[in-house]
């Protein structure tokens, strides 16, 4: 059996994978995240976001602990050369308001209220990016912008070595 070499970007992330917790709240995440080099931070956050969104959409990403790193993921996509994906992420995040809620419970409550009140909110609901984003549009960006995520992430990692 032939072993497959991990992607270049993963080789940079791997040493930090267990050192940065997305599960123990925003403060711990930010504290641990800041200990990694900028290249690793950009790759770590963008990897998590694309992995979660491709698996279950932005709904899954925001509902799960990974939602803590949305701002960093937007920065990461910009850094690896995917500005349209970064812009898309920021647009969807703007649906939460001026200040993005890093706390998982706050995001969950916001989304629960948002969707529970969708009918009565009418135009206000329709105008919110959380009601109108299409996961498929993001999937397309992940696959195609600047060669796609994996090409962009590997190119960024190789430039940073």
Image: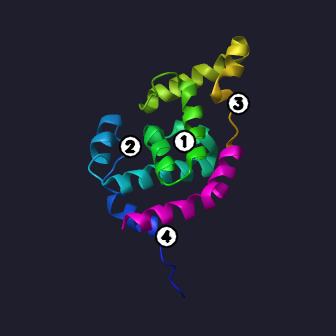
Q: Is residue 52 left or right of residue 138?
A: left
In this rendering, which labeled residue sits more in front, label 1 or label 3? 3
Cα gap from disc 4 to disc 2, whole angstroms: 25 Å
Q: Is residue 142 visible?
A: yes
Residue 121: x, y in percent?
69, 13
Q: Which residue in the structure is indicated by mark 4?
A: 7
Q: Is residue 13 above or below residue 66?
A: below
Cα gap from disc 1 to disc 4, whole angstroms: 23 Å
Residue drawn at point x = 43 percent, y = 42 percent: 72
**Dot label at residue 132:** 3
Q: Which residue in the structure is indicated by mark 1?
A: 61
Q: Is residue 109 left or right of residue 120?
A: left
Residue drawn at point x = 67 percent, y = 57 percent: 144
Residue 15: x, y in percent?
32, 63
Cα gap from disc 1 to disc 3, whole angstroms: 16 Å
- In the rendered structure, which segment of residues is drawn in magenta? 136-161
Query: Which of the pair 68/142 is nearer the observer?
Result: 142
Q: Is residue 36 magenta?
A: no
Query: Which of the pair 40/55 is nearer the observer?
Result: 40
Q: Is residue 120 above or below residue 110?
A: above
Cα gap from disc 2 to disc 1, whole angstroms: 13 Å
Residue 150: which quarter of the image?
Answer: bottom right
- Magenta: main secondary structure: helix
Residue 86: which quarter of the image?
Answer: top right
Residue drawn at point x = 58 percent, y = 26 percent: 95
At label 4, counting other C-alpha atoms closer than 10 Å, the crowd grade (few under 14, some 14-19, many 20 or more) is few
Q: Which residue in the structure is indicated by mark 2?
A: 23
Q: Are marks 4 and 2 in contact (CB under 8 Å)?
A: no
Q: At numbered mark 1, what does the secondary structure look like: helix, strand or loop?
A: helix
Q: At numbered mark 4, what does the secondary structure look like: helix, strand or loop?
A: loop
Mark found first going from the N terminus, 4 or 2: 4
At label 1, counting other C-alpha atoms closer than 10 Å, the crowd grade (few under 14, some 14-19, many 20 or more) is many
């Amino acid at each position: 059996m032939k072993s497959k070499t991990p992607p270049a970007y993963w080789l940079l992330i791997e040493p930090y994978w267990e050192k940065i917790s997305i599960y123990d709240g925003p403060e711990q995440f930010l504290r641990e995240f800041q200990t990694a080099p900028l290249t690793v931070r950009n790759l770590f956050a963008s990897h998590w976001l694309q992995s979660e969104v491709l698996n279950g959409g932005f709904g899954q990403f925001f509902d799960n602990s990974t939602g803590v790193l949305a701002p960093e993921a937007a920065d990461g996509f910009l850094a690896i050369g995917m500005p349209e994906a970064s812009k898309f992420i920021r647009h969807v995040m703007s649906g939460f308001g001026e200040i993005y809620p890093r706390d998982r419970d706050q995001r969950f409550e916001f989304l629960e209220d948002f969707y529970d009140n969708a009918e009565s909110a009418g135009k206000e609901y329709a105008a919110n990016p959380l009601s109108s984003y299409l996961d498929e549009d993001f999937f397309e960006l992940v696959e195609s912008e600047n060669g796609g995520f994996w090409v962009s992430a590997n190119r960024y990692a190789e430039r940073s070595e």
